[in-house]
Image: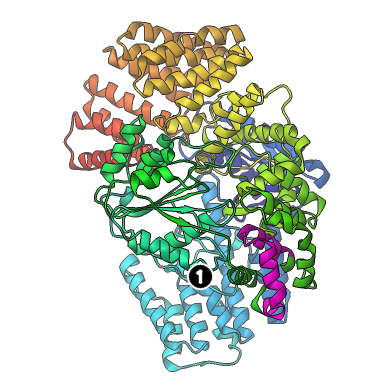
Amino acid sequence: MEFRLLGTVCVDTLTGPLPLGPAKRRSLLAALLLHANTPVSMARLTDCLWDEEPPLHARTVIQGHVSRLRALLVGADARAYGVELATLGDAYVLRAPETLLDSQRFEELLMLAREQRDPADTVLMLKEALSLWQGPALTGTFASAPLQAAAHALEESRLATVEQLAGAYGELGEHHRAAAVLCTEAVAHPLRESLAAALMTALHRSGRQSEALDCFHRTRRLLADELGIDPGRELADAYARVLRGEGGPGGPVAPEHAAGAGSPLSGAASAHARPGAAPGGPQSFAGTDTARAVLPTQVSPSPYTAGGVPADLLPRAPRGFHGRGAELTALSRAAAGEAPVCLVTGPAGVGKTALALHWARRSPAAFPDGRLFADLRGFGETGEPTPLEVLREFLLALGVAPRRVPESVSGAAALFRSLTDRLSLLVVLDNARGSAQVRPLLPGGADCVTLVTSRHRLDGLIASDAAVPVPVDILEPTDGTALLAGVLGEERVLAEPVAARRLAELCGGLPLALRVTAARLAGRPQWTLAAMADELADERSRLSYLDVEDTGVSAALRLTVQQLPPDAVHHLGRLGHHPGSHFDPYTAAALAGSDPVTAGAALERLAAAHLVTEAGPGRWILHDLVRLYARGLDPAGAPDALIGVLDHYIATALAAADTAEPGGEPCFVLPDDFHAPTATRDFTDRAEAMSWLAAEREDLTLAAAAARAAGLDDRAWRIILLQWPHVVWRVRDGWVPMLELALAAAVAREDPYAESRVRNLLGWVLTEEGRTGEAVATLEPSPGLARQAGDRLGEATALINLAIVQAEQGGLDVAMEGCERALALARKEPDAHTEMLALQHLARMQLTAGRPQDALDSARTAFDLGPEHEEAAPRVLLLSVSGEARLALGAEEEGIRLLDEAATEAERAGYDEGAVRALEALLRVTASPDHVRRHAEATRRLTADG
């Protein structure tokens, strides 16, 4: 077990980091760790968790976070490490050995470095100390004054250590290393004069006098422009030494000229700010001997693409691409016509997608308006996306707001053709099953190129849309041997040219089979190519049937899998039962019944054998053919794999919801036979949690559908309902079909609790989409179902959502009565979040009914319950209704102030809908140019981003 403060605050265990949850909980842990083995008072913790006046229930919030932390530590067997979170009167103390805390180890290494006499030993100690840093200190915590001060002190200590490391390199005469270490930090801290002076000295000693002088003048201009001051003595002295040529290139630097000489080699507690140190800004971390500067580029805005940046949905370019010169030429020739449709066809595994992407990536300038890509999954087992789903992705990429995407295929296709009429755009449609699947997705512009790949000929597309076929056959032996050489190296292939050609022939020229075979050879340098060819010879009859989808690949895969360790084979077999399209180590562990560390190692093994492909950082995919083969490795493991991955999704979605909306209570009742994963992904803040929910939306839907098909309805509705933070944030983003699946699962379970919960969310989404009739029909049974289940909070939420629809239909009195009933239920529970929600909507209804004083009183009561700063939406809505109520009561100045505060907070949180509402209310009473501008900007963002 390890506690980390030097980067994202976390607790590392043998099975991965503990799921700490929201920023407030992480902040509490940081406050305890900064004073490890010392009692920390409730008042001190309150200061660390809230900047302004804390809410009335602050003590309860802290006690809840402590209770959750204590449970996490106990579950990780913390006592075995000597770790205990104890209560001492009105304080808490986290007892832990100092060796488990990275900031303490950092301090210890600095002390050891100070005691070294040999600069080489000093370098080793300092590099090891800096390697403990994984990012800015205390990342993921609430930015309260005490924690910011602690983070600044730690950062000052780190920078002093970097300067000392450069000085040690200078004493060794390794000035180029000193410059490399300092360059990265000087870019991140351009106003820190001590860094600039040290860098000048290192550059000068490396024989780079002009760069040293340039560094001085750049820093001098920044000091004048930003702070209005001249360089200090340290920087001026360094400049003078460079001009005099003092201590030129070569040899170790004298101590008084060493980079960072005189810098305190001390811990966070004794670090001091230096003149010119700029707080905040980009951070970079030493511990490597090279540095690289990245300069921003400017992109000319386009009126046809979101944010002025050309849309680019293409996956990463294929690696190790060989040959296909004739096919690439044929593609270029086919793309030269007017509104061409290029049809790349061939057998499974022959490399159609690789060819298409390689060609698409060669000349980005040929498509100035962007490149779109969609996997139509015509031959996969995860189900094809509907034309409307693909068109929706394309339209969003082109800058259309979600709410403006037509709901019919014909309407969306017409809008897509209209938008692309004057564009120069590439559209890649991969894995098409039939012509009808492609036609609605064709762009309208004469300068647009469509590239379709398929295992079928698609004669209908040739007949109706003049598609130009570009057939892709197996690789010729020459290209096959080139592919082998790309993996094994030319020397090894040239040493056995006959055997290499024979291998290419035995693999049938199929790129996937060639890569698998090459991977086996690459891992066994003692094997000859001839020996491998002899082993493959028995499979020749099967490899020749390349027109059969998986025969040749199965032969090659079997031979590869036989060489894998049993653990990797087990993970591969379970991956074949994954209902989604992507997976990470946590998902792979859940499928295999292992832990993320073991699963990650297995994935690396499988990747080395080209059995899985990394689609992005930490996200992997299986080729369709590999998936089919893997499924046959462990057919009996399908039920366990499915249960494992479904419960993994439930646990992770719970963690994401807990972090994104820490006050919410959507559905925290786990299935009766829930299988808790060995480790659950941790989310440092709301943004990370929401990003995961957005990235996993498709796989979560596929998992729910698989659960429904397997009769696991208790999992299906939970997996869908736990996405509620993402649903709330992007309510008009096409959630109804998914929620209807959840409702069907709840009804099939005859579970009134589940049915009520799903109806609540589905009814609210229908209301926001303007489908009030359907919303009423969905919501009316919900309060009774919740009552039947004994779910007071569910009943309260149902009454609130039903009241919203009733108010929109003009029934304000009935709606307010429903909100008051919900308020009473929330207070009986008690539940501050639901109580606040009822008050928020009641206030809005009271304002609409012409009762501004009642609305103001309801909003005040809601504010007394919270909400915390991370709960942006309720805060903004409460501020808005308070401001409008003040205006209605004649307090115009106070009303404008509250509405402006609401708009500012919404803009800061990226809650554009709340900003638009607040600014619209402001513009009804003031024509301030600032408000007009901000309203236009928020409306534009809302239109672009939905």
Q: How many numbered marks does the figure carry?
A: 1
Nearest the camera: 772 or 263? 772
Q: Is residue 743 above or below residue 471?
A: above
Q: Is residue 12 visible?
A: yes
Q: State the image coordinates of residue 9 (x, y, percent, origin top left).
A: 61, 49
Q: Residues within 10 Å of mark 1 (few under 14, many from 20)?
A: some
Mostly what secondary structure, the magenta segment?
helix
Which quarter of the rendered picture does the C terminus lie within?
Answer: top left
The amino acid pointed to by label 1 is: Thr
Q: Is residue 505 above or below residue 764?
A: below
The residue drawn where x is 42% and y is 68% is 191
Q: How is the image coloured?
A: rainbow
Q: State the image coordinates of residue 725 (x, y, percent, origin top left).
A: 49, 31
In magenta stretch: residue 495: yes
The segment highlighted magenta reads 491-520
The residue drawn where x is 79% and y is 41% is 77
Which structural element holds mark 1? Answer: helix
The residue drawn where x is 54% and y is 40% is 696
Q: Is residue 804 above or below residue 325?
A: above
Q: State the image coordinates of residue 807 (x, y, percent, origin top left).
A: 34, 13
Residue receiving disc 1: 184
Nearest the camera: 161 or 678? 678
